[in-house]
Amino acid sequence: MEVGAHSRWASQTLRELGHEVLVANARKLRVIFDNPRKGDRADAHTLARLSRLDPKLLFPVEHRSPQAQADLTVLHSRDALVRTRTLLINHVRGIVKSTGARISLCSANTFPSRAAASLPETLKPALLPILETVHSLNQQIHSYDRQIEALSESQYPQSLLLRRVAGVGPITALAFMLTLETPGRFHKSREVGPALGLVPRQDQSGGSNPQLHITKTGNTYLRRLLVSSAQYILGPFGPDCDLRRWGLQLAGRGGKNAKKRAVVAVARKLAIVLHRLWKTGDDYNPEHSSQALGNRVPIAQPA
């Protein structure tokens, strides 16, 4: 079957009935969705023929376990609340700004009280309920933060090891472990970057090898978290370490998109480092040999 919204429970049910199940990666099946005579029967025939010829042609997808999916839902729920809070805060700021007033810069936690004091009287009936909603969202987000911290300490203690890397907090560390689920999923740590869509596309043919954007395959949420961590590492508050030096070296080469490329490159190497730490259980050394920087990944040293 093709991967989709129902493939998780459908594949699990079929396995419980004693069947061997292959969940095909839809991105790799252009032979199906580019078929001018596409239909359910034709799709089933194509999947069956490909699986009989060579199952690897389907690039089979491994779904997470029900427990890992349930724990990951905690992170996704928190992310949904944060995005909703951001939308509401931007809405309030935009409306107030259009009247000539301003709300001073502040954190999301203090925004409801700061904004309430700055609202024009004519806008209070419309915007005060939104500020109350933002306050409620803040409380719910803090509740999720405590739940995530408890999950990390009780069920996923190895995430504490990943958090020793600068820029990696409880959310990124837990999302990394729950998304990949097991370090043995990848034979080499360098395979993690391509799996998360952090490598450039390739369209090489003869002497032509154009520079393309990253593939953006894999889990969007985890890729966004890794990029945010990379931005912190390269930002003004990032501590000095091998990853930061290497990223700043890339950004300093100039070019229109040098900074963006450096952030993506650091995010890719960060994923490799996290997988290495998770797989070996070694302690992270941010100052590991800076020799051959850019050609070798700063891996961990034994504890």
Image (cartoon, grey):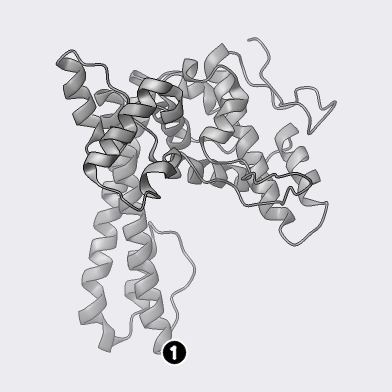
Percent position (x, y) of residue 175?
42, 33
Numbered label tally: 1
Residue 28 visible: yes
Task: Tell which residue pokes out farthest to the front in this image.
Answer: 37
Query: Can you identify the residue that label 1 sits on?
Result: 100
With respect to residue 210, does 3 lie above or below?
above
Task: Tell which residue pokes out farthest to the top in this image.
Answer: 302
With respect to residue 300, does 192 lie above or below?
below
In the displayed structure image, the side of residue 195 where residue 97 appears, left or right: left
Tag 1, which secondary structure? loop
Residue nearest the viewer, comparing 78 with 57: 57
The amino acid marked with disc number 1 is Gly
Percent position (x, y) of residue 303?
63, 10
Percent position (x, y) of residue 87?
35, 65
Residue at x 41%, y 40% (from the top left corner): 29
Residue at x 32%, y 67% (from the top left corner): 88
Residue at x 32%, y 24% (from the top left corner): 22
> Which image quadrant for residue 146?
top left
